[in-house]
Amino acid sequence: MSSDTAAEKNVRAEDDEPIELPSDPVVILLSILVILASLTAAYFAAEIILPIVVALILKLLLEPTMRFLRKLGIPRGLGALFLILVVFGLIVGIGAGISGPASEWAAKLPDGIPRLQERLKFLNQPIEVLQKFLHQVDNVVGGGGGSNAANSAEHPSVTSGLAATLFLGTTHFASRFFETILILFFMLMSGGIFLKRGVEIVPRFKDKRRLVEISLDVERHISGYLVTITLMNAAVGIATGIATWATGLGDPVLWGVLAFLLNYVPIMGPVFGIGIFLLAGLLAIDTLWIALLPAGLYLLIHVIEGEIVTPMLLARRFTLNPVLVIIALVFWFWMWGIPGAILSVPMLAIAKIICDEVSALAAVGHFLGGDEQ
């Protein structure tokens, strides 16, 4: 008896179908120009476009809940207001809950540096060798630029430049928070007004029906993807908070929220998280092997979620090319800072879902996909 499921048969049937490649050079050239123009606008008008993109993704994330409220007979306006209040309350509540612990950890860091140096003294010799090597390279390239370190010490603005650049996107994002909430409210309240207007514009009934089918399929798949990813990231955050509480690190809400946000950033987010949990454990826990537990448990949680649970839930259809994921991460971080890094994978997944549903873009969707598991 065959153990193949209907879903697997459908996937193989789709794989057997030939992928139509665009052949009109004019269409290809115009598409490239449109993409370049859109990216240019996204770069120079980031303060306007970023809140719109965030609101759109949140709208797709909240759309299943919105449909559920509509089934209960709640008017769309009241449902949108309720969801906005819930989102606003969660963000403000979590922000207030982690601000205190975050400030305490920031205050501990200066006094804890000698303790970290003592516990990591076995790394002193390799670091000194690396510093000497870099100093020699700097002398050769810069003509005796031995004063660089002194300049950095005398001018704190030099060393703080990286931090300022790193959090520039976050500052802009926070400053447009209410704009995002406002746009999200009207997107939720408007419902399918854009689809309705599009159907009215299209002349033929066949094309109208196809437009509705594609729009609903794209919205359903994107909403399912975003909800799944968000729930899995929330599970990672809860598990990490429990792990930090059990190991004695404390402040489980702070570490859970941090793990939740970092899980949106592929590869680099978990790597950065491991470093943070390692330093926090060495700073707060006396016994060395217990101090390493928070970072080890966080790594274990991430491996279970990233390599087993999430791929099983999303299936092969929603897997992405890992090289393109890294490129998207670097590109959108350069474009929009930390918010861009967080949004990079959801935006790439949305692009793949749209391309998979539109036959003319099937080749692009296939290119964005990852290998079979």
Image: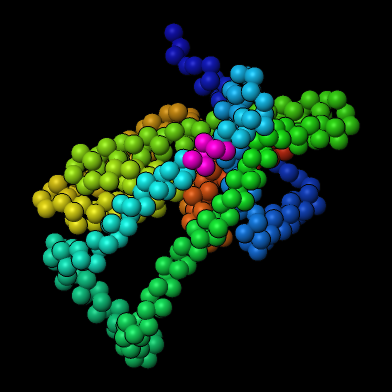
Up-down relation of residue 57 to residue 147 (above or below): above
User: Could you tell whether 278 is left or right of 369 in the image?
Assistant: left
The residue drawn where x is 80% and y is 35% is 198
Residue in front for this viewpoint, 95 or 260: 95
Residue most toward the left? 287
Up-down relation of residue 258 to residue 36 (above or below): above
Residue in front for this viewpoint, 180 or 365: 180
Quarter of the image with the C terminus is top left
Up-down relation of residue 6 to residue 113 (above or below): above
Q: Is residue 70 magenta?
A: no
The residue drawn where x is 11% and y is 53% is 286
Residue most toward the bottom? 143
Q: Is residue 87 magenta?
A: yes
Residue 168: in sight, yes or no?
yes
User: Could you tell whether 258 is left or right of 210 in the image?
Assistant: left
User: Could you tell whether 332 is left or right of 202 in the image?
Assistant: left
The residue drawn where x is 47% and y is 67% is 165
Residue in front for this viewpoint, 301 or 267: 301
Q: Quadrant of residue 1?
A: top left
Q: How many marks?
A: 0
Q: Position of residue 326 (x, y in %)?
A: 48, 52
Magenta part of the chain: 84-89
Most common SS among magenta residues: helix
User: Could you tell whether 86 is left or right of 146 in the image?
Assistant: right
Residue 270: in sight, yes or no?
no
Q: Position of residue 267 (x, y in %)?
A: 40, 49
Q: Position of residue 296 (x, y in %)?
A: 23, 45
